[in-house]
Amino acid sequence: MRFSVSVRALTLGIALTSLSTCPQFSTASDARRPDQSDIAQIKRLRDEKAWFPALEKIESLAAQFPDDDDLYVLRVHTLGEIGARQKAWQLFRARPTLFSAEEAQRIELDRLAAAISGSMFYAGTPEARRTAGLDAELAVQDYLQRSGATTVPQRLRYDRMLLLNELKRHEDVVAEYERARAEGATVPAYVAAAVGDSLLALRRPEDAFVALEIATTANPQDTQWGIQQAYALSEAERFAPALELLDRHVAGNEPWLRAADARQSHPNWKRYDAETNRALMASYAEDLPGAQAALEPMLEIAPKSSGLHAALGMLYARRGWAERGLRHQRIAATLDPDNVSALIGQTESLMQLQRDDLAAPIVAELGRRYPDATHVLRLQRDWERHRGWRWGIETAASDSRGTGASSPQGAEDAHHAFRIESPLIDDRWRVVAGGDDRSAEFGGRTVRDRRGWAGVDYAFDRLGWRLVANRSVDALDSAGLSFDLQWRFSDTLDGGLVARRHDPNASLQARASGLQADTFGVSLAWNRDERTGVSAALQQSRYDDGNRRDSVSLRQDQRLLTRPHLSLTGTAGVYASRGSRDDAPYFNPRRDASLEYTLKADHLAWRRYERHFRHRLAVTVGQYRQDGFDSAWVASAQYEHEWRFAPGRVLTYGARWGKPVYDGNREEHLGVYAGFSWGE
């Protein structure tokens, strides 16, 4: 999310133009003319900028001398000076021959400036602002056509750049800016700020920083332009200088003073803006706890700030607390129905909470009210992808050395799979289908299981489940049925249940002996936030030979280091299982257990908005113990690349290495894998 550049200071650049000196007046043809002392008094009042007394005198004399040209000209100019520029322009258009070319241009430009200013600041609703802006652009085009000018007056060029920025015609803004720079023109600071906003919308953060540098150099104390410049740095992945820039603006503004017994605090909204955006910037740099600690106390300062509630909602959603985030986003939208960030945040949280039925009308309303807004267009693309087709393919193969007779993995194994999911039906249903091809070599014999599957997926509010039927083409009587259920208890607690008849993921080694298994399991996951999580699972596999294999696992993930482009996560896992038979023709220890520690490094090497390249390295060491054999140290490692070409289009590939122990025999596995997913 990015805060738009404030244009409160631009009003003077549009609405209060340079004041004119007394014009040269035409000579009236009528013999009856006002006394020259009255004319002199009017001119004196105008020189003193006493516009309303001057206009009152003009109107009084005009009632006596309605055909006097000098009074007519004075009236037009004075109306323009008090801001009634549309009325002044209408009078000018009625008798244009009374005015010089210079006066005519100034009246025309004053009227256009007033129209542009009115569309940006005075129209009440977004729809009214857009309509007024389009009308102002039509007026500009009408003037340019009537004037026949070969070059656009500089003042109009800059006013129109502001208008085009407001109309979200960012390419036109940047094109005009580049033409002005090529001509050697010095772009005013307030215009450069708008150009920076357009360049950010066009995803050119480096160029936006240069344009915003013009604005901040002219007025280094302007907090809003400094904030915008910081966002340009962050979008160029330069978080450290962005935070330093915001720190300077925080330090450069007096704090918001509050005394325990005071009836009213001493406000400083510039400091407040700098601090809130500094906190948001910290969240973009992955310091979510720090951002939360900075934002939450500000609710005491500005409990009715729509922007603050929207920022907190976004932050909570990023920490994994979608319900909590949604509450604040709804508060923000209630406080300000025109807060686009709050409405977008609501939509994103509702999608995460599986409530597309509530998100759909918000998306439609945003599209109707803000059809050209950059963030709204991006949301609409995300919405369409979220509800559209999904598919993926993956492949993996490995080779094993030192494989014992009871090794469950086999000497050589491979797995190839594809899946496809239909667009969302009635906000909650999808039709799913796919296929798997698994193979492994056991004792010189290759066992293969090629299986197709199809089913339905349901996801609505707290409940999600998938029912899938599958069948193997390599074994008779190998049809299966799988049921997976998930329930969201809260933002931090989730539960799951699985029940599979002829589990396709059961031991392929057992299938080599013509045995299949049914699987039942339950799981529970508690994620305090994005940095800490604990999960536990219980599972039982029931093989056709009467063997019952029970297992329990417990795992904790803890973020150890977080930087804008690097994270280190530590994982501790405990696993234990037991089998009811000793004579199974597949790996089935009476009892076994393992304790493993994993350190995973995730480095974001390159990112350009939604596209990125990252690589990960995970190293695991642990101890494995099996009844009847000595305990042994085990180790594994995995390295992978991830390319994200666009939202929902991800290619992943990597290599795995491991040294497990089965029945006291040390093995070494080396494998490669790859996968591509399309959709959310």
Image (cartoon, helix red, strand yellow):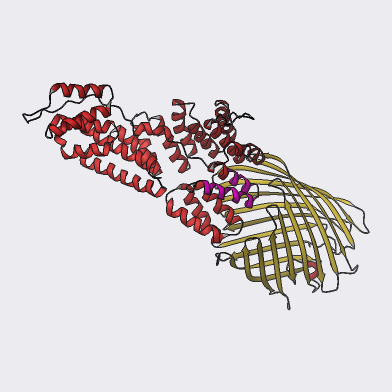
Residue for point 20% across, 22% down: 41
User: Residue 12 placed where, x, y %?
Assistant: 37, 31
Percent coordinates x, y for residue 301 in the rendering: 59, 36
Q: In the picture, residue 193 is in which quadrant?
A: top left
> Is residue 263 in sight in this rendering?
yes
Q: Residue furthest bottom?
A: 477
- Secondary structure mostly seen in magenta is helix
Front-lying residue, 18 or 458: 18
Image coordinates for residue 651, horizontal then vertical, percent? 60, 53
Task: Give the vertical position of 475 relative to 42 (above or below).
Answer: below
Q: Quadrant of the C terminus?
A: bottom right
Residue pushed farthest right?
Answer: 628
Above or below — where is 622 with respect to 355?
above
Q: Is residue 329 located in the magenta-colored stretch of the structure?
A: yes
Residue lying furthest left in this view? 31
Task: Identify which residue, 625 or 514, lies in the foreground.
Answer: 625
Q: Residue shown at 34%/40% (left/top)? A: 116
Q: Describe residue 239's horizontal placement relative to residue 507 as left or right.
A: left
Which quarter of the picture shows residue 286? Answer: top right
The residue closer to the viewer here, 659 or 579, is: 579
Is 96 in the magenta?
no
Give the residues in magenta.
311-336
Q: Quadrant of residue 308?
A: top right
Residue 526 or residue 239, whichever sits in front: 526
